[in-house]
Image (cartoon, rainbow, N blue to C red):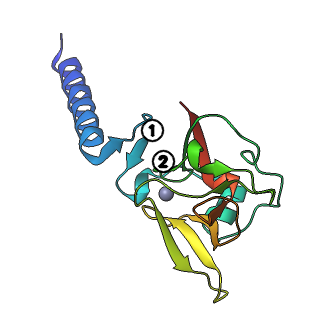
Amino acid sequence: MTLGVLGCLLFLFACGAKDTTSSNVSNQSNSLGLVVPTDSTGWNKLTKEEERVIVYKGTEYPGTGEYVDNHKKGIYHCKRCNVALFESESKFDSGTGWPSFDGFIGESVEVVLDTDGFREEIVCRNCKGHLGHVFYNEGFTKKQTRHCVNSISLKFVEG
Ligand SMILES: [Zn+2]
């Protein structure tokens, strides 16, 4: 074996070891195995339409979202950062054309005043990605709360 080949092998080993270490230290997996990056460099790349809703606070046309009529059991995660946001148990049919949830997981969702000055916007607490809005006292469920969420802001994992 020449010194050149040995050098290449050492280089490859060093790089491989470094990558493994950094991914173990900087990322953590959530309950369903999706990796939640600790900073924005690890967030999922968004399509133009995802960006329009999640980054620029757009709204999906009602009735068109992927999860409006999804009744499977599982967890809805943030499309951008993979944090677990909603459980299927909290989802209900509101007839509004958007996925509706009467609760969220832990502290994963943050409520902020919409720029319109009266509605309450909901964002992912981790990455601040736009999810939708929250409404109260409409009589849908006992919790009297409807988190109205754009399907495109979510990634559903069955389980
Ligand atoms: Zn997020």
Are the residues tagged 2 and 1 within 8 Å (C-beta)? yes
The disc placed on residue 34 is: 1
- Counting from the top left corner in percent of width and height, residue 125 is at 44, 64
- Which residue of the protein is positioned furthest toward the top in this rendering? 1
Residue 70 figure quarter: top right
Q: Is residue 38 left or right of residue 34?
A: left
Relative to the observer, which residue lies in front, 66 or 118? 118
CA neighbours of label 2 inside 10 A, class few (<14), some (14 to 19), many (20+): many
Rendered residue at 83%/54% (across/down)? 63
Q: Disc 2 marks which residue?
A: 82
Rendered residue at 40%/61% (across/down)? 107
C-alpha span from label 2 to label 1: 6 Å
SS under mark 2: loop
Q: Count up the numbered dots.
A: 2
- Counting from the top left corner in percent of width and height, residue 154 is at 61, 50
- Counting from the top left corner in percent of width and height, residue 114 is at 61, 81
Relative to the observer, which residue lies in front, 22 or 133? 133
Q: Amino acid at mark 2?
A: Asn
Q: Amino acid at mark 1?
A: Leu
CA neighbours of label 1 inside 10 A, class few (<14), some (14 to 19), many (20+): some
Relative to the observer, which residue lies in front, 67 or 21? 67
Relative to the observer, which residue lies in front, 151 or 74? 74
- Counting from the top left corner in percent of width and height, residue 18 is at 23, 37
SS under mark 1: loop
Q: Is residue 67 left or right of residue 80?
A: right
113, above or below 83, in the image: below
122, above or below 115, in the image: above
Q: Quadrant of the N terminus?
A: top left
Rendered residue at 52%/78% (across/down)? 112
Ligand 1: does it lie within 8 Å of the C-beta at label 2?
yes
